[in-house]
Image: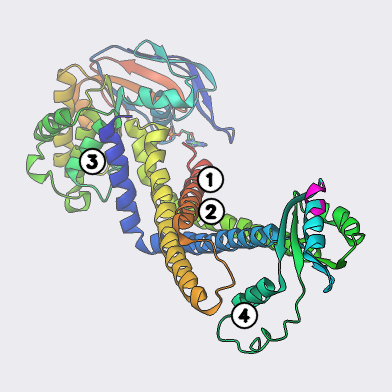
Amino acid sequence: MLELYAITKIYGNGVVALRDVNLKVDKGEFVFIVGPSGAGKTTVTRLILAEEKPTKGQIIVNNKVVNNLKPREIPFLRRQIGTVFQDFRLMPNWTVEENVSFAMKVVEAPTRAIRRRVPEVLALVGLSSKAKHLPHQLSGGEQQRVALARAIVNQPYILLADEPTGNLDPDTAWGIMDILQDINAQGTTVLMVTHAKNIVDAMRKRVVALEAGRIVRDEYRGSYGDEN
Amino acid sequence: MKIRTWAYFHGQAFASMRRNSWMTIASIGTVAVTMVVFGAFLLLANNITHMAGNIESKVEISVYLQDEITSEEIDRLAQEFTSLEQIALVKYVSKEEALLRMRDWFGESSDFLAGLEMDNPLRNGFDLRTHRPEQVLEVVPILQTFDGVADVQYGQGIVEQLFAVTGMLRVIALGLMLGLAAAATFIIANTIRITVFARRREISIMKYVGATDWFIRWPFIIEGMTLGLIGSLVASGLVIWFYQAAVRSLAVSLPVLPLVKPWPFLLGVTGWLVLLGTAIGVVGSTISLRRFLRV
Ligand SMILES: Nc1ncnc2c1ncn2[C@@H]1O[C@H](COP(=O)(O)OP(=O)(O)OP(=O)(O)O)[C@@H](O)[C@H]1O
Ligand SMILES: [Mg+2]
């Protein structure tokens, strides 16, 4: 499903962000990636999205080697991966509905399919009543749910979430986690980078801990670990 | 790409034009000004060529005959001229006809020709035309050797000068045009660059969702193309209006100056404007996308 083999990433400025990282995630897993700031967590997500190429090693997503994709192949990789970020990344001038349907327009889905599917995912994230709102008319938690809806509307194989609850209060954060669990329960692999100790500890999922670019721990039914 | 995707691209392009209405107006204005200048150049060049052609077709050798010549001698000269290989056309012009022509030229109202019928100072002669303009110089010395020929005149020098002047005019106008086209392309490129820059965050979001480069580019290209198209349509309107007015007023004040008839001439001219304006729009936006949208 998702495999990282002996990945080393050295940025242009000489910073070694990842050293010899090996990670295998099966279909349908829920994985937390934790670790102190600068450990290389975001770098992992950027390599998976082919935003950056690994300096050494190989990345395989859904049986396809992605580390040497040609630029014009990258969009097709990203269509298999839903992404959610700490800063939501919504189109500010587009309504909730437009933001979500955009992901379907990109893949040139039939108009009829868009009309059927968009309300469906908006219902799933509990935003049916806000379909015509603009992002700035929503709370942070609601904006993150729009981003989630957009990430899953095309039913991706993997959902990558980089600190999706980073800007949200605890209650709202749990709302997002409930949705992520729902999505995971429907078969989507979820990879979530987080600093939220309480969430990781409460959910008892697989935890991969990074430190200074190395995997220092990889436990099933794990916890956040020591205070960082 | 599917039709609904193209519809979506157009929607995006027009939304962007509406959002940046000032830039949109400035770009359209620049293209319009460029295309008006280009249109003026096309009008001028075509009319000069037209006039030159008119004059060239009138490059005639005028052979003036001695007054005391008999009509048998005239007939004989006509035959001899016709038999010269360089000569394409031989036309006898009596001095009465010459006077009529002159009156035509100066117009009915001019009365300084009045009374000339009594004592016509003009001479009988021939209008000759060669197959090619450069044969004029060859044939003139031969014509001068015929008995009964008083004088031979031809206007080739004038034609050469005219062509020299129009040639220079063309070079200057073309240079001016190239400069203006570059300026218009630059302005469009700049407009698109600013939109791309303002929307770089949106573009990066599109990339996360899996939009291809072309999916991101097309709305910008359509925007540039539309700016070019509207600008050149405005210019076409102005050119059509101006030329029709010019033809109308010159027909009254300067009837000897024959302008090219407006239609279908203007159709060709504006066709070029629209083609070039649209091309400028496409090239301008493409330059910006290549340089500023590293997707
Ligand atoms: N584009 C880049 N160019 C150079 N160095 C980078 C770049 N991105 C990240 N780094 C460096 O790589 C290291 C890992 O960064 P990364 O963003 O992966 O950390 P992180 O684990 O996500 O941290 P945080 O928890 O603060 O988000 C850091 O030392 C960072 O300074
Ligand atoms: Mg990070």
Name the residue furthest left.
A129
Q: Quote the CA–CA distance across marks 4 and 1.
A: 57 Å
Of the residues tagged 4 and 3, which is closer to the observer?
A: 4
Reading the image, the residue beneath label 1 is B287
Q: Quote the CA–CA distance across marks 4 and 3.
A: 76 Å
- What's the mark number on residue A99? 3
Reading the image, the residue beneath label 4 is B106
Of the residues tagged 4 and 1, which is closer to the observer?
A: 4
Give yes or no for contact between labels 4 and 2 (Cβ–Cβ under 8 Å): no
Residue sitting at 51 percent across and 21 percent down?
A8
Reading the image, the residue beneath label 2 is B185
Indicate yes or no: mark 3 CB to ligand 2 under 8 Å. Answer: no
Where is residue B287? Give x, y as percent.
53, 45
- Number of callouts: 4
Q: Quadrant of residue A31?
A: top left
Q: Residues within 10 Å of mark 1 (few under 14, many from 20)?
A: some
Q: In the rendered structure, the residue with mark 4 lies on which chain?
A: B
Q: Quote the CA–CA distance across marks 1 and 2.
A: 9 Å
**Image: magenta residue range:** B80-84
Secondary structure at numbered mark 4 = helix
Residue sitting at 42 percent across and 44 percent down?
B221
Q: Quote the CA–CA distance across marks 3 and 1.
A: 29 Å
Of the residues tagged 1 and 2, which is closer to the observer?
A: 2
Amino acid, disc 4: Phe
Amino acid, disc 3: Asn
Q: Residues within 10 Å of mark 4 (few under 14, many from 20)?
A: few
What's the magenta bit mostly, secondary-structure-wise?
A: helix
Secondary structure at numbered mark 1 = helix
